[in-house]
Image (cartoon, rainbow, N blue to C red):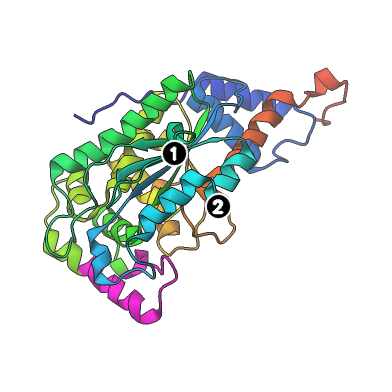
Amino acid sequence: MLSVRIPPLDEEAMRKARERQERLTKPKGSLGFLEEISVLIAGMTANERPRIEKKLVLTLAADHGVAEEGVSAYPREVTAQMVRNFLRGGAAINVLARHVGARHVVVDVGVAEDVHADADVAANFVVKKVAYGTRNFLKGPAMSREQAERAVKAGMEVLEEEFERSNGLDIVAVGDMGIANTTASSAVVAALTGAEPEDVTGRGTGISEERLRRKVEVVKQGIERNKPFEDALDVLAKVGGFEIGGIAGVILAAAARRVPVVIDGFIASAGALLAYKLNPHARNYMLAGHLSAERGHAFVLKHLNLRPILQLDMRLGEGTGAALAISIVEAACKILDEMHTFEEAGVSGALS
């Protein structure tokens, strides 16, 4: 069973956070979205003056059988190669996780080969492999329903294990790695929302116009050949990916623990959409790290009613945009907690 109890936002903590924001030494509302973020974090954590100290970035990796349809600019073996790069600390997400002071953990949910971590980084590598990549969804379901459940559960388990390891978490960011996963994500988003495939299918790794047309056609055919869809889990099973399911599981488990989740780009948002369809209350614990340049991302954020924190035309994935956004969330909470009120500073308030 994938059911989890997700508590509502703490309205009292939000009320007190909002009242404090209005008493800080600034014109009311002058810090814009920063103020709203801090109030949301107060509600998520049930703490009127939350602090962001224990930070975690999770990059979930898996391969996709649909890669054999020529939908990516890179060969399938790049997934495993990039996982090794993560473990050596040489990727963009490693740099940005270090930059924001976050622990970075790589999760193998379905990489097509076995990756072995050296002893000094083994603690930052978790193997929850459901299978050695999904099947090509043009030739049948990408995975079985049982495998779909295992993928979601894998993400839930990772969050629980990291929560216990760190004796609690203040925030978690989710990202992805997997050649052809934008194709699977486009299919998941289109199937879950009824969107036209061409509206939610982009260039991913930077493919040509000709390859993009092929990619859109693959998404269309994949949905047509695998319909009807019974429910959200069935969508994941038929056209999704193991890392998409894993990301959904992380979000569900984090929400149950009152841990805010910063969502990265298009693939992570497909996982967030899946989590929302599995349990709508999970939406209350999501923050959109950024607006990706990938077509379809804005559509998903609008569907989830999430406002992106950053807009930097990024489309790398890995968790990079979400990791950067952690620093903004931390700043918002510091403003709420550390900035003086008019009374504390001895500054005259606004004239009525």
Judged from this view, the residue extending furthest toward the bottom is: 210
Name the residue type under label 1.
Asp
x%, y% of residue 128?
29, 37
Chain-order first, disc 2 or disc 1: 2
Q: Answer whether residue 289 is visible to the viewer in this image.
A: no
Q: Residue 150, image x and y in percent?
A: 22, 37
Circle 1: element type? loop
The range drawn in magenta is: 198-220
- Name the side, left or right, on which 273 lies relative to 234: right
The picture quadrant where one finds residue 277 is top left
Amino acid found under the numbered disc labelled 2: Ala
How many marks the image carries: the answer is 2
- Farthest-out residue, front: 119
Q: Is residue 116 left or right of residue 319?
A: left
Residue under the image location 23 percent in, 42 percent down: 130
**Vertical arrangement, residue 78 with respect to residue 61, above or below:** below
- Distance Cα–Cα, label 2 vs label 1: 20 Å
- Label 1 Cα crowd, 10 Å radius (few <14 / some 14-19 / many 20+): few
Determine the main secondary structure of the stretch shown in magenta. helix
Q: Which residue is mark 1?
A: 118
Circle 2 is placed at which residue position? 92
Rendering coords of residue 348 (x, y %)? 87, 26
Q: Is residue 117 magenta?
A: no
Which mark, residue 280?
none
